Amino acid sequence: MNKPKIFIDGESGTTGLQIYSRLNQRDDIELVSIEASKRKDAHERAKLLNCVDVAILCLPDDAAREAVSLVNTSQVKILDASTAYRTASGWVYGFPELNPGQREKIANAQFVSNPGCYPTGFLACVRPLIAKGLIPATFPMTINAVSGYSGGGKSMIQKYDLFHEEEQDGSTYPYGIYGLQFGHKHVKEMHQHSGLASPPLFIPAVGDFEQGMLVQIPLPLWTLDHPPSGEEIYQAIAQYYQAEKFVQVAPFKDASLLRDGTFLDTTAVNGTNVVQVFVFANDNTKEALLVARLDNLGKGASGAAVQNLNIMLGLPEELGL
Ligand SMILES: NC(=O)C1=CN([C@@H]2O[C@H](COP(=O)(O)OP(=O)(O)OC[C@H]3O[C@@H](n4cnc5c(N)ncnc54)[C@H](OP(=O)(O)O)[C@@H]3O)[C@@H](O)[C@H]2O)C=CC1
Ligand SMILES: CC(=O)N[C@@H](CCC(=O)OP(=O)(O)O)C(=O)O
C-alpha cells in the first residue's frame, strides 16, 4: 500500500517545525517538502497542496485562506493550524476529546481546524460542566491565562531573544498581561465550542519562558442558587475524560502534581501532547478554580495537529506522540 503523502505548508515556522520533527521520524507516511526558495511561491505551493493526501497549514490566517483557495480537488484533506476556520461552517473542530462523536467527525472530514492553544485549555476544563449542566450556560465566565513566548511565533521568539541579549545590560522583560482591548482572536472560538450563552472575558498574559501555559478559570460558585461541590465538579470532569489518554484530570485534593506540594508551574507537561486539568475548590466559601496546563506547542498546536492527522488517516491516534 502507498504511504499517505503529507505536505506542511509553513514547515519552517514555529508550529510547522514542531510538526515536522514529530512526523520526520515516521516510516508510515511520506513527507513532501517545498524547496526553501519557493516556500512563498503560490504556484509551487499549489502543486504540492494538490498532490498530497493531507496538507497541514501552519501559516498566518491570510496565508492559510490563500492555501485553501489553491486546493482544487476534494481528494486532499486540509488540517489548518491557524485561527482562520475554527468557527467556520463546513469545517470540523479538531478537538477529538471535546464531545462524543467528535473523533468520527474528524475522521470523515475534508476540512479540519486545529484548536487554538488557549481555547484547548479553556474548553478542556469547561465543556464537561456545561454539557452536564453543572454550571449553567449563562454563567459569566472569565479566564486568566499565561503562555510562554513561543505562543507568539517566530516574531515573538526573536523579540525575546533580543531582550535576553539586552538583559546583559540590566534590562528585563517581565511577565505582563495583554489583550486589554478585549476581543482576543480566541474568544469567538471559546464561546462557540463551549456552549456558553455569552462570550467569556479573556485576559491572556505572556511570561519570560519559551514554552508551556496555564489557563485559569475562577468559579465564584456562591453566585449560583445550587452550587455544586468541588467533588461534584471534579467527578463530572474526570468521568467525561475517563477513556482519554491526552486529557488527564489530576486527582482531586492531591498535591503530588504541584511543585513542593503548593506551586503549579507552567512547564511540567512541555514536550508532551497532554493537557492536564486541575480542580481546586473550597466548599465553605463556595469558590473553585479550574486550571489547564499544557504545552502551547504540544496539545496547544503541533501535538494536537499530529493527533488529528492520525485520526484523519485512520491510524492509531497516538502515533508519533
Ligand atoms: N505558536 C503557537 O504556540 C501556536 C501557533 N498557532 C498557529 O499556527 C500558525 C503558525 O504560527 P507559528 O508557527 O507560531 O508562526 P511563525 O511565524 O513561527 O511561522 C509561520 C510560518 O509561515 C510562513 N509564511 C508566512 N506567510 C506565508 C506564505 N504566504 N506562504 C508560505 N509561508 C508563509 C512564515 O515564513 P516567514 O517567517 O518567512 O514569514 C513562517 O515560516 C498561526 O496561524 C498560529 O496562530 C496555533 C497554536 C499555537
Ligand atoms: C503568547 C501569544 O502571543 N500567544 C498568541 C496565541 C497563540 C496563537 O498563535 O494562537 P493560536 O493558538 O490560535 O494559533 C496570542 O495571544 O495571539
Image (cartoon, rainbow, N blue to C red):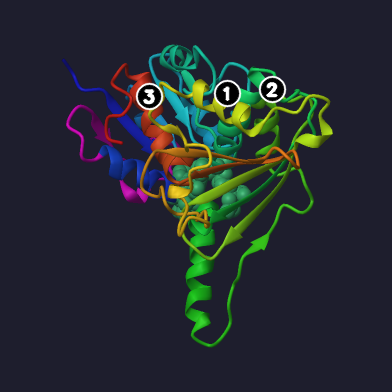
Which residue is the site of mark 2?
Answer: 134
Q: Quadrant of residue 8?
A: top left
Tell whether position 34 is magenta. yes
The amino acid beneath tag 1 is Ala
Q: Alpha-carbon neighbours of circle 3 within 10 Å: few (<14), some, or many (≥20)?
A: some
Rendered residue at 53%/74% (across/down)? 163
Rendered residue at 29%/45% (across/down)? 21
Residue 238 visible (yes or no): yes
Q: CA distance from mark 3 to mark 2?
A: 46 Å
Q: Nearer the viewer, mark 1 or mark 3?
A: 1
The amino acid beneath tag 3 is Asn
Q: Quadrant of residue 104?
A: top left
Residue that protrudes farthest toward the front in the picture: 284
Q: Alpha-carbon neighbours of circle 2 within 10 Å: few (<14), some, or many (≥20)?
A: some
Which residue is the site of mark 3?
Answer: 50
Q: Which mark is residue 102?
A: none
Vertical placement of 7 versus 148: above or below? above
**Where does residue 49 sit, x and y in percent of width and height?**
39, 29
**Where does residue 270 sit, x and y in percent of width and height?**
40, 50
The amino acid beneath tag 2 is Leu
> Is mark 1 in CB contact (under 8 Å) with mark 2?
yes
Q: Quadrant of the N terminus?
A: top left
First to last magenta residue range: 24-46
Instruction: Tell me which numbered mark, 1 or 2, is placed earlier along the sequence.
Output: 2
Q: CA distance from mark 1 to mark 2?
A: 8 Å
Rendered residue at 49%/12% (across/down)? 101
**Where does residue 92 sit, x and y in percent of width and height?**
53, 19
Rendered residue at 36%/33% (across/down)? 306
> Is mark 3 in CB contact (under 8 Å) with mark 2?
no
Q: Nearer the viewer, mark 3 or mark 2?
A: 2
